[in-house]
């Protein structure tokens, strides 16, 4: 593959090696090794610990006008491949984004039971003939649908992990909640901690971790509201906890649907087979090029039907 980008510039993959052509910034330098190091650390944003290791192992080579980097070594998947269909939303030599269906966890829980998204991604890599470690960058709840980002090499993993820490990876969700959400509810800035009385639950708690959720769009429905929600932090169950605390639990959310004031749809029993939450888009910078990528994951059929039901439309 050969790509042009604003970060690392033009590059070509040759087996385990990436070949880049940085141009005069290195070819015109008196001290080429120093210029290479500066370019890798400052322009390409290569993590320092990876740079040190590649230098030590001979993984950085200058050949003519080309810089060769050992960025694609073969790695064990680290998890057993399980051959089921996986929907790929984006893939290149650095990143993979796949759709996570409802009822599938991202990674194993230690019980040894159940098929996870990581198992399916391992099989996808195997089907392409590549030996790649399975490295998810973020997670979704088991019953939440949406895009999940995977790094296909150590360089991508280190860069994307740092972007997660810096909160520069943007995740936009669609949530269908009970009741009419006031137009004035735009930001929920409430700390989230564990619930002492329920091991699986989280709750708004003064002693919890800082958590901020933004409501960036809304669509009124019959006794419900479709919300477009953006996370600025990634606490466990954050959207579910925050919206339930605000009196608008997600439709179908058995864990947080009890006791929400102003839900407006009869009882608080779920009317949907899972919590009505979907990741509609994922935006991040490509680890090598720095290009902004926005990956869209269309609303799944079950949530489309729910929206139509609550807006008075009928499905034939």
Image: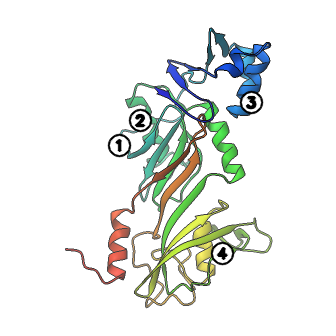
Mark 4 vs mark 3: which is more N-terminal?
3
Which mark, by number, is residue 265?
Answer: none
Determine whether the residue tagged by mark 4 lies in a helix, strand or loop: strand
Viewer-closest of 198 and 119: 119
Of residues 244 and 255, which is closer to you in this image? 244
Q: Quadrant of residue 150?
A: top right
Please determine whether, in this image, residue 23 is positioned above or below residue 249.
Answer: above
Return the residue found at the far top: 64
Callout 2 crowding tier (Cα within 10 Å): few <14, some 14–19, many ≥20 = many
User: Which label number is shown at residue 41?
Assistant: 3
| First-in-chain label (1 vs 2) | 1
Q: Is residue 12 above or below residue 212?
A: above
Q: Nearer the viewer, residue 19 or 204?
A: 19
Q: Which marked residue is nearer to the observer: mark 2 or mark 4? A: 4
Looking at the rendered image, the disc whose residue lies closer to the viewer, 3 or 2, is 3
Mark 1 touching mark 2, by CB under 8 A? Answer: yes
**Residue pointed to by mark 1:** 84
Local packing at callout 4 (Cα closer than 10 Å; few below 14, some 14-19, many 20+) is: some
Q: Earlier in the sequence, mark 4 or mark 1?
A: 1
Dot 1 and dot 3 residues touching (CB under 8 Å): no
The residue shown at (48%, 85%) is 268
- Element on which disc 1 rests: loop
- Measured Cα–Cα span from mark 4 to mark 1: 39 Å
The residue to which callout 4 is attached is 187
Residue 60 visible at all = yes
**x and y, in percent, of residue 266 in the image:** 43, 91
> On the image, numbered disc 2 is attached to which residue?
123
Q: Answer with mark 3 or mark 2, whichever residue precedes in sequence.
A: 3
């Amino acid at each position: 593959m050969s790509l042009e980008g604003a970060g690392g510039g033009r590059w070509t993959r040759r087996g385990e090696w990436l070949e880049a052509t940085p141009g005069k910034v290195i070819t015109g330098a008196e001290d080429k090794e120093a210029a290479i190091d500066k370019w890798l650390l400052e322009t390409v944003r290569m993590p320092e610990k990876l740079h040190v290791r590649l230098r030590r192992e001979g993984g950085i080579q200058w050949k003519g006008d080309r810089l060769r980097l050992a960025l694609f070594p073969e790695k064990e998947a680290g998890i057993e491949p399980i051959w089921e269909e996986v929907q790929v939303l984006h893939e290149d030599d650095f990143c993979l984004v796949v759709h996570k269906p409802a009822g599938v966890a991202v990674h194993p829980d230690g019980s040894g039971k159940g098929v996870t998204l990581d198992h399916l991604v391992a099989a996808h890599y195997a089907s392409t003939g590549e030996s790649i470690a399975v490295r998810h960058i973020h997670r979704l709840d088991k019953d939440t649908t949406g895009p999940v980002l995977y790094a296909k090499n150590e360089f991508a993993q280190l860069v994307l992990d740092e972007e997660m820490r810096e909160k520069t990876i943007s995740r936009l969700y669609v949530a269908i909640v009970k009741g009419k959400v006031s137009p004035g509810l735009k930001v929920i800035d409430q700390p989230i901690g564990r619930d002492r009385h329920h091991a699986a639950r989280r709750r708004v708690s003064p002693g919890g971790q800082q958590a901020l959720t933004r409501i960036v769009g809304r669509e009124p429905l019959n006794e419900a509201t479709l919300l477009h929600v953006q996370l600025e932090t990634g606490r466990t169950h954050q959207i579910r906890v925050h919206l339930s605390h605000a009196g608008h639990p997600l439709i179908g959310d058995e864990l947080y649907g009890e006791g929400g004031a102003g839900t407006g749809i009869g009882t608080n029993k779920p009317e949907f087979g899972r919590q009505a939450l979907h990741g509609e888009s994922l935006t991040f910078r490509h680890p090598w090029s720095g290009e902004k990528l926005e990956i869209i994951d269309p609303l799944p059929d079950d949530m489309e039907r729910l929206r139509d039901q609550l807006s008075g439309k009928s499905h034939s």
